[in-house]
Amino acid sequence: MELIAVEEIAGLKYYRLLNENGDPFIAEPLFTIKKPKSRVVAGIVREIEGIIKKRRELIEHPGYIIYEGIELINDEYCLLRRGEEIYQPLDSNITGEKISLEEVADWIISLGELACDAEKAGITWPVIFPNSLYLSKDKSMKMMDPDISIQLLKYREPEDANLMEIYLAPEVFRENIRDQQSLIYSTGVIMYYLFTGELPYNNVSTSDYSKSDLVHEILNITPLEPAYLNPDIAPALNNFVMELLHKERRERIENWQSFLERFKSIKAAGLYASKEERERFAVRAEKVIKKARRKKGFAIFWRKRWKTMAIVASIVLVFYLVGIYTAVNPYITAETAPEEVVEYFYLAIDKKNTALLDESSEMDLKHLDRMVASIHVIESMRSAYDFSGEEEKEGVFGIYDLEIKKLDDYPTYQVDYLFYFYIEDDEIYNAQISSGKDYLHRYEVNMSDKLKLEQIKGIWQIIHIEGSLESIIEGRIMDLVE
C-alpha cells in the first residue's frame, strides 16, 4: 500500500492509500483519544478482524460500511476499506445545522433497513448509537458495525462525553436483556435526537449529573414528547417516537419489518404537523417543558439530596425502628377525639413522624408514606450533623396555617392549609451555579382536603381522603403547581 495523503475531518484522521493496482483505499486509526496497552490492542484487533470476516457478506445494504481488514500504517492500527470517499461522523454534520425532516426520515429508513438485514442474518447488535453513524457526500446514511464501534468507544471518546448508556433500553439495566426490542428502543433515542436536537434525558450537561442519575431517568421518567421541542413534527410521528421509547418492551413496535412499514406509512402521510397542530403544541410547549423539568428535578432531588449521609442514614433508621417496637405510649388512644386524630395526621406530615402517621390513618398512603419516611431520615441526619448552632432550619416540605372544620356528615372534616416544598430548578441552577449557591425553588400551595374517620377497634382513624393530598399520595406532587 502506498500512502498518498493524510486528512483530518471532525477531529478524526484518515489516510488515503493506493494498492499495487492503483485502487484507492481509505484507512482510519482505531484509537484516537488514547491507545490501550499492547496486550489489549492485540485483543481488540483480533476481535474486530473476526467481526469483519464474519459479516462482510452477511449484510449487503449499501449503507453498511464494509472493511477489508486492519492495516498497520505509520505505527497505527487502522480500519481499511475500499474507495476514496471519506465519510463524516453524523454528529459533526448535524451540529448547528437545520436538518429537514425529510433528510432525517431517509436516514431512519436506512437505519431500519440495516437493522432488518442484520436481524435476518441472525445478528443482534447490543446497541445502535450515533458513534456508529456517518454521512456520505450525498448525505446518505452509512453505518460502521455497532459491534466494532463499541470496541473502540472508550478509545475514541473522552470519558466524560461517553454517554452510550442513554441509548440503552430499560430492560438492559433491569435484566441485562439485549435483543431486537432493545435495539428498537435505541433507534427511538436516535430519532428523538435527530428530530428535536435534544436527547430524551437532557440533564447530562449539569456538573453533578451522574450515570446513576441517567439510569434512574431511563427506568422511571417518561421523556418529554418530541413535538413540544419541535412543533413541526406531525402527531403521528411524535406518537411513533414515544412508542419506541416505551419502558415496557411489549408496548413497543414488535420487529424491524413492522418498524419500517409503520415509519414509511407515516412519511407518506406527511412528516409535518398542520398549522393548527403546530399552534396547539406551541401554545402548550413552554408550560409542559417547565412542568417536565420540575418533575425531573423533584425526582432527582429525592434521590440525591444529602446523599453524602446515605451511609449513616441506615443507622438512624435502625434507631427509629427500635423506637417503634419499644414504644409503650401511643399518641392516639380510645380517648383521642376525631378532630385530634386529624390534627395528629397533619402534624405527622409536617414533622415527618411515620409512627404517628401510621397511628392516625388506616389507609394505604403510598407515596406520601414513603416520602415522609425517607425525608425523616434525611432531616434527622442533617440535624445530627449541623453543629452551627443556628436556628432550626426549615424542612424539605411542611405545613403552615392548618385549619380544621367539622362538616355536617360527622365524623367528616374539612382541612385547609398551606403546603410548601422544595425542588431543584433548572433556571435557578443556571443562574446560581457559578456562584456556588443552592439551586432550590420553593413552592407554596393552598391545599384543601376532606377526611372521613371511623372507629376501628375503639380508636378513631382516617379511612378516606379527598382533595389536594391525593396528588401526593398518588405520586403526582407537581400537579399541585400547574
Image (cartoon, grey):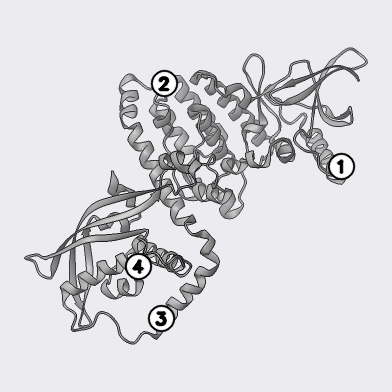
Q: Which residue corresponds to mark 4?
A: 352
- Disc 3 residue crowd, few under 14, some 14–19, many 20+, Cα 10 Å: few
Residue type, label 2: Tyr
Residue type, label 4: Lys
Residue sitting at 28 percent across and 68 percent down?
Answer: 363
> For this rendering, which residue is in front, 338 or 84?
338
Q: CA distance from mark 1 to mark 4?
A: 58 Å
Q: Which residue corresponds to mark 2?
A: 272
Residue sitting at 78 percent across and 22 percent down?
Answer: 14
Q: Secondary structure at mark 1?
A: helix
Q: CA distance from mark 3 to mark 1?
A: 60 Å
* Depicted 418 relative to depicted 164: above or below: below
Q: Which residue corresponds to mark 3?
A: 323
Residue type, label 3: Gly
Does the residue at mark 1 contact the one at mark 2 (Cβ under 8 Å)?
Answer: no
**Sooner in the amino-acid sequence: mark 3 or mark 1:** 1
Residue 223 visible? The answer is: no
Residue sitting at 17 percent across and 67 percent down?
Answer: 452
Q: Position of residue 242 (x, y in %)?
A: 45, 37
